[in-house]
Image (cartoon, rainbow, N blue to C red):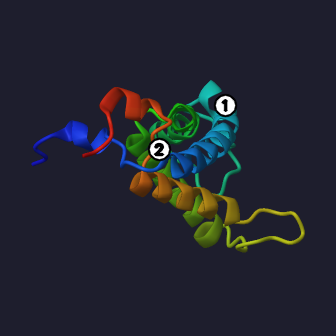
Amino acid sequence: MIKNPKRLLEPVPHPAFQSAALLLVRLIAGAAFVIHGWGKIQTPFSWMPPEAPVHLPGFFQFLAALSEFGGGMAWILGLLTPIASFGIGFTMTVAVHMHLMVRHDPFVNLTGGLSYEPALVYWGIAILMMVLGPGKFSLDAKVFGERK
């Protein structure tokens, strides 16, 4: 049992330079996720096309739409970053699996077609955000304070 669950939301302390770098990554990746998730959040239970290789139930489509749009907003704000990063990381795990194992897409497609490279890069950023946290320039730092 976790004695103080609030501690999970307290960012790891970083110097200002490192926090600025984390802010930059959060803003760029967060904006990308808001854009990717915008269309999905409009019809959150049915955004997948019928011709998709695997059709996920509406609830899982909702979770993906929420993690992309809501997680992107959370990264931009630096609010509830570990929770948002977990959701994005899980969604990107499913995306990598779909591209690699189901569609057999290459890591990088030099002809401009589909690949699992973007999903794997975003997965790595989600891991980074879970481990390093959002930095001191975040709402998490203001609301929960930094870890001691």
Q: Position of residue 12 (x, y in %)?
A: 36, 49
The kind of residue tagged 2 is Pro
The residue shown at (69%, 66%) is: 117
Asked if residue 95 shows in the view, the reply is yes
Pick the residue in front: 68 or 128: 128
The kind of residue tagged 1 is Trp
Question: Disc 1 or 2, which lies upstream in sequence?
Answer: 1
Q: Which residue is mark 2?
A: 134
The residue shown at (53%, 52%) is: 18
Side of 112 relative to 87 (left or right) = right
Q: Which residue is mark 1?
A: 38
Pick the residue in front: 100 or 71: 71
Asked if residue 43 shows in the view, the reply is no
Secondary structure at numbered mark 2: loop
The residue shown at (63%, 39%) is: 27
Distance between the alpha carbons at the discs numbered 1 and 2: 23 Å
> Looking at the image, is 89 positioned above or below residue 137?
below
Q: Label for residue 91?
A: none
Secondary structure at numbered mark 1: helix
- Kindly indicate the quadrant of the structure image that contains residue 141: top left
